[in-house]
Structures are given as C-alpha cells and as structure tokens.
C-alpha cells in the first residue's frame, strides 16, 4: 500500500490510500480510502509507517529532547589537554575535585572567557552553557568553589612553572622574555600603579606582566609586577627563577633593547654566567659610526655585517640594514614633519593676525610645546619665540644625519660565532615576535585577560597565571589545526625562500592561497572555509550533546553528526568521536 498525492487545479491536492496488486499478470491499483480531510501531519505519519520507518511520538509520552549542550569545542579542548598532560601540571596531593575544577577553569577560559561568577554558571549542572562541567563530572559548582580553586591555583604557581620548565627548557637553550602592561578597574589592588601604558589607557592604573617562553614560543612562566616597574627592573627576578627554581646552569636570554640593557648585562646576566642576545639603542649605533667601526659602504652589496668594538668586550655585534624599514621610517618622518609644520603655521598665523593676536613668549611657547610634543618633532626644528614673534625652520642637517641611519639596527650577543653565526643571531632575536603574539592572544583576541577586576595581589597573579595556562593549551591546539586556520602552516618553505633573515618576512604559498581564497589549501579539505582560532571553536561548538528520552523512561545521550569541517578538525587533533 502507498499514499498517492493527486493534484487538483483549484483546490488542495487529494491524498488517496491505494493498494497495488497483480491480476492476470497485470499490475493494478485500487483506492482504499480518501485521506484528504486528515491533517497533513497525520498523513505524513501514515506514509512513514507504510515505508516501515520507526515511529516515536513527540512529547512527554514519546520521543523528547530534554537538553542540548554545545559539546564539540569541549571535546576538542579536553582531548588535547589530556594528551599534553595539562592536568599533570597540577599537584597530585590536592583532592581530585579541586584538580578537576582547576582543569575546568583553564579550559573554560579558552572556550568562553568570562567573569568567575559566569564561569561557575556555565559549569554548574543546572545552568550549564556547554558540556564541560558534565564531561568532567563536576555536578553542582558555586562561585565560592571557583574562587577557592583560583586561589589554590595561584598558590601552586611555583610548582606548575617548575613542571613546565622541565618539559620545555634545558641547559643551553634559548629563553625568550618580554613584558607588557594591562590596565585594572578600581584602585584597591596593591599592584596597581600608573605607568607607561601599552594599552593607551593612561587614565587607569595598570600591572606589568613578564612572560618567559621557550625558543618555539611555548609559554613557561609568568610574573606580575607593580604597574610602574620599568622593563629592565623585571629581568633580575627572571634570572633568579631560571637559576634557582628551574636549576638551569646556562641559557641564552633573548630580549629587546629596552629589556636587556648594558646595566642589566653587567649587573645581572654576566655575573649569573648567562649568555644574551639583544639590540643596541640608536645613540649606541651612532657612536659606532662616529668611531669609524660602522662603515656604511659595507652595506652597498649586503644587508648584514659582523663587527666588534672595544666598548663591548667579549661580544659580537651584528649590524643589519633593512631597505624596507628605511623607506618606512623616511615616509613616516616626512609625514610627521609635514603635519607638524602645518600646525606650526597655524600658530604663526595666530601670532601675526591683526585681530586678537597671540601674545607673550610664555603663551606662544606653551602652544608650540604642545604641538611639538604631540609628535616628538622638537629635535627637528629651530624656533624663534619672543612676545610678538614666532618663526620656525627645519634643521636640515640634523634631519639628513638621522636619515643616514634609517633601516639600520644592531644586535649584540655574547655567543661565539661557532654557536650562532650572524644569520642565526638575527633569527633568534626575531623569534621574540612569538612572545608578542602570545601577549596579543592573552590580552585581547582569545583569552581577554584585560581589564582585570580582582582586587588582591594573590588573586590578580592567579588570574594572570590562569590566562597563561589557557594560552598554553591554545598553543598546543594551534599547531595541528594550522592547516584549517589563517596561520601559516608551511613556514619552513617560506623561510627557505628568504634570501636573508634581514629581508622582509614572507608567508608561504599555501598561506597566501588560504588568505586569498578563504579556503583551505590541501586536497582533502580544499572546499572548506578557513577559520580564525576563535571562529573554529564556535564552529565546533555547534556539535551538540543531546539528552534524549523515550516514552518518559529510557534516556540516551546522543551527539549530532559532525560536519565535514568538524570531522577535519577532530582528525587533525586526534579526537576519537566514538569515544565521546
């Protein structure tokens, strides 16, 4: 039997229940009933029954989906967390529930950065917004438990960092170090101070955060300082940490020129027996040229040269010239000079106008100082200011002298040439970009460390440690997922195409193809869209974990069928869907 749909020109189609049978070798149809007056839902149910489909009524007495929680991103993050032994970083002497809550805090920070109260809500069984709490068997979770776990995590920071150092650092390795700042809300935190704000929030007190990474950019340790701490003042505590806590006899410290200064080298690094790679400031490069040690003619046919200086005994200097950097500095200087001259011309017009002119050397100087200080162009102008006169001219010779050094930078290192040649020294120094990338992920796009709302110093430090551990998990997830992300997953080929480490960094052809087509570039996923790390997590979250009840008695947990994009991501991460 089957249901036939018979169209009517001016009315609703008719639905007839028909039987097909054979008579005298011929196939015939017979109408058994006219179903046209039945609701369309019942007609479709009868059609499914005739096909032999299993039927389950919807509602309290039949098939019912009682809960559906986002699960795919939880499955991916927990699988990677357990594979890299993230829970092994936590002390085993603690109760298992506390360790589970700490792991949940780290994973939740990666999946959905939120306040601690909101985190408690998303982990609690009743108010869960994803399956993380259920996957870890947390049951009821309160905000008090979350804060207690955060405080415990902060108290175990030394143990956790020691474990990370054993995994990722060894004697003789490169250690990358940099510092950043982030602002706070409120005035009660004893670490909060006003200082140089990298967030352009001078109206807020801030913290200074120092991050130690392995040579590949994997985070190892983090430390929080008062907001007015200068970058060089943070180095000594890192040396103590490396030598005493991590028990490393010898490493190579890599830091920028504002971090590892001559004073830090003489007072901290050299007495500790550590090597270093850093850069010289502009006045030091100018002294090399004035002393005849830096010959500009060396760079007519090359972009890198190694020199020595008696001012830097037992050190090698690697001087580099980047033509693209030189052009950018020239363009920027010319643009700032032009803008400053426009503003100075307006002030000159105010002084010379007949109606309500600007008068008084002090008043004129105050307005001129504001203009010059805005773009830091005072060194490039000669000024004449009296009570009734204001004139300005460019210092052409000083500008030309500064332009001679455009594109030049110099690295200094204590490593011998047989350990790291000039090219290797440049590559090691440029690896600091990985720490800057970590700060960007931790502070903004992925983990949202800022603004900090905690008031006590231990809790602020615990919050920063939590964000670093979440980035540790993200760093390990990004490596296998790189073919699906906008990240360059073929950096080796891009580096092979560079003629020099000083030359402009290139992306690989595969990364360029991904960026231009917005599609993954490999043969097995060429039709799939490319994601950022955050949007890929959002995509994975659409794979849900559903609690299904049959006839009010039997309950099952069923996952939705993964999409091709999700299957690809799980495959790269090594996630076994059947084990979910």
Image (cartoon, rainbow, N blue to C red):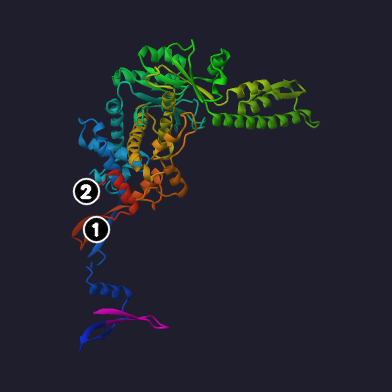
Q: Tell me, yes or no, whether the highlighted magenta stretch contains residue 16.
A: yes
State the residue position of label 1. 548
Which quadrant would residue 31 be assigned to in this image? bottom left
**Residue sitting nearer the eye, 9 or 397:** 397
Mark 2 falls on what kind of element?
helix
- Residue 405: which quarter of the image? top right
Quarter of the image with the N terminus in it: bottom left
Regarding residue 83, the answer to whether it shows in the image is yes
User: Comparing marks 1 and 2, which lies closer to the viewer?
Assistant: 2
Q: Is residue 460 above or below residue 258?
A: below
Query: Which label number is shown at residue 95?
Result: none
Residue 384 in picture, x, y percent from top left: 73, 21
Asked if the residue at tag 2 contacts the one at tag 1, i.e. Cβ–Cβ closer than 8 Å, the answer is no
Relative placement, left or right, of 552 versus 437 is: left
Q: 531 or 245, which lies in front?
A: 531
Residue pictured at 69% horizontal, 31% vertical: 343
Q: Secondary structure at mark 1?
A: strand
Q: Earlier in the sequence, mark 1 or mark 2?
A: 1
Q: In the picture provided, is 490 more to the left or to the right than 516?
A: left
Mark 1 to mark 2 CA distance (whole Å): 19 Å
- Magenta residues, as a range? 1-17
Estimate the x, y position of residue 79 in percent, counting from the top left. 26, 42
Q: Which residue is mark 2?
A: 579
């Amino acid at each position: 039997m089957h249901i036939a749909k018979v169209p009517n020109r001016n009315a609703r189609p008719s639905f007839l229940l028909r039987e097909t049978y054979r008579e005298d070798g011929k196939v015939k149809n017979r109408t058994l009933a006219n179903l046209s007056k039945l609701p369309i839902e019942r007609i479709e149910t009868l059609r499914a029954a005739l096909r032999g489909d299993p039927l389950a009524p919807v509602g309290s007495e039949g098939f019912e989906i009682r809960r559906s929680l986002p699960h795919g991103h939880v499955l991916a993050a927990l699988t990677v967390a357990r594979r890299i032994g993230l829970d092994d970083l936590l002390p085993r002497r603690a109760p298992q529930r506390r360790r589970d809550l700490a792991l949940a805090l780290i994973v939740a920070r990666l999946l959905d950065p939120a306040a601690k109260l909101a985190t408690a809500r998303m982990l609690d069984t009743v108010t869960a917004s994803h399956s993380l709490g259920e996957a870890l068997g947390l049951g009821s979770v309160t905000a008090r438990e979350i804060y207690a776990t955060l405080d415990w995590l902060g108290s175990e920071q030394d143990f956790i960092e020691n474990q990370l150092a054993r995994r990722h650092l060894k004697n003789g390795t490169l250690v990358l170090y940099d510092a950043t700042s982030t602002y706070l809300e409120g005035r009660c935190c004893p670490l909060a101070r006003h200082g140089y704000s990298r967030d352009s929030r001078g109206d807020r007190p801030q913290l200074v955060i120092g991050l130690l990474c392995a040579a590949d950019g994997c985070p190892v340790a983090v430390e929080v300082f008062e907001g007015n701490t200068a970058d060089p003042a943070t180095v000594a505590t890192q040396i103590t940490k490396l030598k005493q806590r991590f028990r490393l006899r010898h490493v190579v410290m890599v830091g920028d020129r504002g971090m590892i200064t001559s004073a830090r080298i003489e007072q901290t690094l050299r007495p500790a027996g550590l090597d270093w790679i850093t850069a010289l400031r502009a006045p030091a490069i100018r002294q090399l040229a004035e002393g005849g040690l830096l010959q500009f003619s060396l760079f007519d046919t090359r972009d890198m040269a190694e020199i020595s200086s008696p001012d830097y005994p037992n050190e090698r200097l690697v001087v580099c010239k980047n033509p693209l950097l030189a052009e950018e500095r020239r363009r920027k200087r010319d643009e700032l000079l032009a803008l400053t001259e426009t503003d100075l011309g307006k002030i000159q017009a105010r002084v010379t106008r007949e109606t309500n002119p600007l008068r008084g050397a002090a008043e004129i100087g105050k307005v001129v100082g504001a203009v010059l200080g805005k773009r830091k162009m005072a060194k490039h102008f000669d000024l004449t200011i009296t009570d009734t006169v204001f004139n300005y001219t460019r210092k052409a010779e000083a500008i030309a002298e500064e332009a001679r050094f455009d594109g030049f930078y110099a690295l200094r290192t204590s490593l011998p040439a047989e350990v790291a040649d000039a090219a290797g020294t440049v590559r090691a120094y440029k690896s600091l970009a990985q720490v800057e990338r970590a700060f960007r992920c931790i502070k903004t796009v992925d983990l949202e460390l800022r603004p900090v709302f905690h008031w006590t110093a231990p809790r602020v430090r615990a919050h920063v440690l939590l964000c670093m551990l979440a980035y540790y998990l993200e760093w390990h997830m990004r490596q296998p997922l790189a073919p699906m992300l906008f990240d360059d997953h073929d950096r080796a080929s891009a580096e092979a195409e560079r003629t020099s480490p000083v030359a402009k960094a290139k992306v690989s052809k595969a990364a360029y193809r991904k960026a231009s087509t917005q599609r993954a570039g490999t043969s097995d996923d060429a039709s799939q869209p490319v994601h950022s790390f955050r949007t890929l997590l959002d995509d994975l979250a659409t794979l849900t974990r559903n609690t299904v009840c049959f006839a009010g008695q039997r309950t099952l947990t069923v996952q939705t069928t993964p999409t091709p994009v999700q299957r690809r991501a799980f495959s790269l991460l090594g996630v076994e869907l059947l084990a979910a």
